Amino acid sequence: MGNGVCGFLALLKISEGLTQGTNAIAQAASYHWAAWLILAGMVFDAMDGRVARMTRTTTNFGAQLDSLCDLITFGVTPGLLVYAVCHTATFLPNRVVEVVAVLYVMCALIRLARFNVESSPDEKSHQEFAGLPSPAAAGVVATSVIPWTAFPEYTFFDASWQFVLKGLPIIAFVIAILMVSRIRYAHVVNRVLRGYRPFVTLVELVLVFVLVALLHEFALFVAFLGYTIAGPMLWFRRGVFRRPAPDVSAHRDESWF
């Protein structure tokens, strides 16, 4: 429910930005808060399923509620954010931006419905995802907006980040397709929290946290984009460097002849 509330508040902020007209700084502030609300919803979403499995309180009702809230925060809200930011700030026609925003929402809906059908309460089934998870896709959209909205008063920075905003509809189109693909993605939270970890892992997590805290306007975008790209790269590597099947006939026991 916290995830769903964050998604709805983000929608309100985007709506405020769309009504600001030519006030660029006010628009940037509204979209900035909307992006952070998406990330706040991600924190709730990362913990609820794991807590339910740990306490053995998983129910079908909880699973359906989780996906419905995900659709708001990680489906509808990022799609509207792409339209709000890019309908006047990209080289693409406005109608193309509208189509991309609708496609993003529809792919998120398909992704979540498929996840509900194929997932189970078992912890082992939550170590990998088939297709890019909708929170990660929403994270790419949200963190691509944060650097631009964090420094609206700096003309040079605004101009240097425009290439990301102008290409955001293309990015949204690609991640929408990745959501409905069968490319495998690791569940980062479950992988990190699973089992005992050496002390060096704690040190690495602290260093990552410090870097993200100091450079959060850029580090989060790089992290989400890197996670998104890692899936296709690993899929391609497995396809190219796949080991050939062993020749069974060459290793038959003589008793079979």
Image: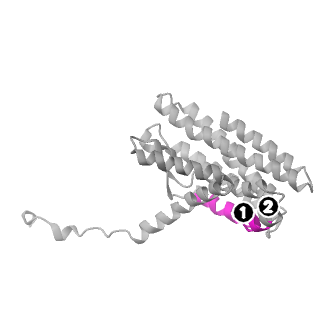
Place residue 176 in its image quadrant. Answer: bottom right
| 10 Å crowding of disc 2: few (<14), some (14-19), many (20+) | many
Q: Position of residue 205 (x, y in %)?
A: 51, 48
Is 28 in front, or is 96?
28
Residue type at the position of mark 1: Leu
Residue 108 in the image: x percent, y percent?
64, 51
Colour scheme shown: one colour
In this rendering, the answer to whether 161 lies above or below 213 is below
The residue labelled by disc 2 is: 86
Q: Position of residue 69 (x, y in %)?
A: 66, 39
- Contact, mark 1 vs mark 2 (Cβ under 8 Å): yes
SS for tag 1?
Answer: helix
Secondary structure, magenta segment, majority class: helix
| Residue drawn 75% across the image and 68% down it | 160
Percent x, y of residue 60? 54, 33
Which portion, as a residue range, is magenta? 159-178
Say whether residue 255 is magenta.
no
In the image: residue 33, left or right of residue 237: right
Image quadrant in which the C terminus is located: bottom left
Estimate the spatial distance between the alpha carbons at disc 1 and disc 2, rounded to whole Å. 7 Å
User: Which mark identifies residue 168?
Assistant: 1
Q: Nearer the viewer, residue 247 or 90?
A: 90
Which residue lies at the image location 47% right of the left edge and 47% below the top edge? 203
In the rendered image, the vertical position of residue 193 relative to residue 237, given as above or below? above
Most distant residue in the right direction: 22
- The amino acid type found where label 2 is placed reads Cys
Residue 178 quadrant:
bottom right
Mark 1 vs 2, N-terminal side: 2
Residue 126 appears anywhere in the view: no
